Image (tube, helix red, strand yellow):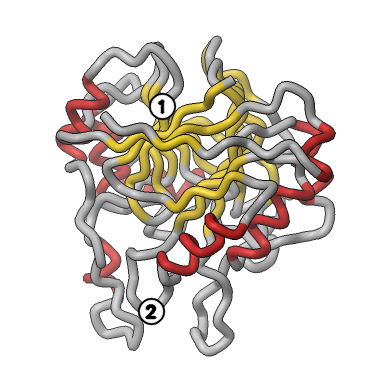
Amino acid sequence: MKTTEIPANVCCQIGMRKNIPSMIEQPFAGSLVNRLAANETAFALYWLGQAGFVIATPELRILIDPYLSDYLAGKYSHSPYSHARMMPPPVKPERLDNLNFILCTHRHGDHMDPEALPFLANQNPKCRVVVPAAELAFAMELGVAESQLVLANADNPMTLHSDLRIHPIPAAHEAYKINAAGWHHFLGYILGLPGGVIYHSGDCVPYPGLIERLREHKIDLALLPVNGRNPSLVGIAGNFFLPEAIELCREGLIPALVAHHFDMFGFNTVDPKVIDSAIRAEKEVQVFRAKLGVCWRVRQ
């Protein structure tokens, strides 16, 4: 199996951190199902498309924002913005039967999948489903049992397993949304795992104080959406532009980035060649373009 390693550059502000880990990218043959069924010996990360990821450790199987159906194509069939998938799911929900946790950052259908999420929860009755506390009623309406739900809110850290700590932080998509109880509808999750500290921003744009929050956690890898913002897309909230995502990592002392949230819907994507160009040009942050058929690992 061919392994591609991009050396971590210890320079400028990122050099303020000691013992900075680097990421390695490993293409693999065969199905993702078979990979997830195998016994992992260390942290492994896989992309599911859009903002979805699987994290596998020797003890846990964790999904984040899995969009595995074609629900939105039907919901928006009469919209000027086609939501037909540009890529098929890399795994069918019925093949995922060994899950411990599912994390959803917010209620949008490509993050809290109205078809796949309740199916996965029902198929994995011991699995805990982490959702923003503000979306409790919505998650239950989708068919997720209340007994499986774990309610998250910004700056209320949780230890869900000896190998999993979660610190939710606010996300701005493109602004905060907070209910009357003070609960955030849009969250990012900072995950403390045996293999490192991972930040999944959810759908988000830069906001005041975000860099300072991230620096506190000594994050090893950020998973950031890079489809940007387009004012002509009426009613469609945007995300980081790729240069903003890279700058966030640089200023937040995060040495590595997997750029995602593209190639799912044709009206709201970014050319993968743009990401590849940034990978070649960037000297401080390891930048990876999310790909199917690839595993990422943290090398300490």
Q: Amino acid type of disc 2?
A: Phe
Q: Is residue 254 left or right of residue 87?
A: right
2 and 1 marks in contact (CB < 8 Å): no
Please state the horizontal and vertical placement of residue 184, each as a whole percent of the image. 66, 51
Q: Nearer the viewer, residue 88 or 130?
A: 88
Mark closer to the chain start, 2 or 1: 1
Residue on which the image places disc 2: 267
Which numbered tag is attached to residue 197? none
Q: Amino acid type of disc 1?
A: Ala
Work out whether 153 lies above or below 269. above
Quarter of the figure that contains the N terminus: top left
Quarter of the figure that contains the C terminus: top right
Work out whether 179 lies above or below 183. below
Q: Is residue 212 left or right of residue 63?
A: right
Which is in the foreground here, disc 2 or disc 1? 1
Q: Nearer the viewer, residue 8 or 28?
A: 8
Mark 2: which secondary structure? loop
What's the residue at 16%, 33% (across, down)? Answer: 95
Please state the horizontal and vertical placement of residue 94, each as a whole percent of the image. 15, 36
Please state the horizontal and vertical placement of residue 187, each as a whole percent of the image. 61, 48
What's the residue at 30%, 72% (across, down)? Answer: 83
Is residue 223 among the parts visible in the rendering? yes
Is residue 147 among the parts visible in the rendering? no
Residue on which the image places disc 1: 44
What's the residue at 26%, 25% (across, down)? Answer: 36
Q: Residues within 10 Å of mark 2 (few under 14, many from 20)?
A: few
Please state the horizontal and vertical placement of residue 201, each as a whole percent of the image. 59, 48
Work out whether 40 lies above or below 252. above
Q: Residues within 10 Å of mark 1 (few under 14, many from 20)?
A: many
Work out whether 125 lies above or below 207. above
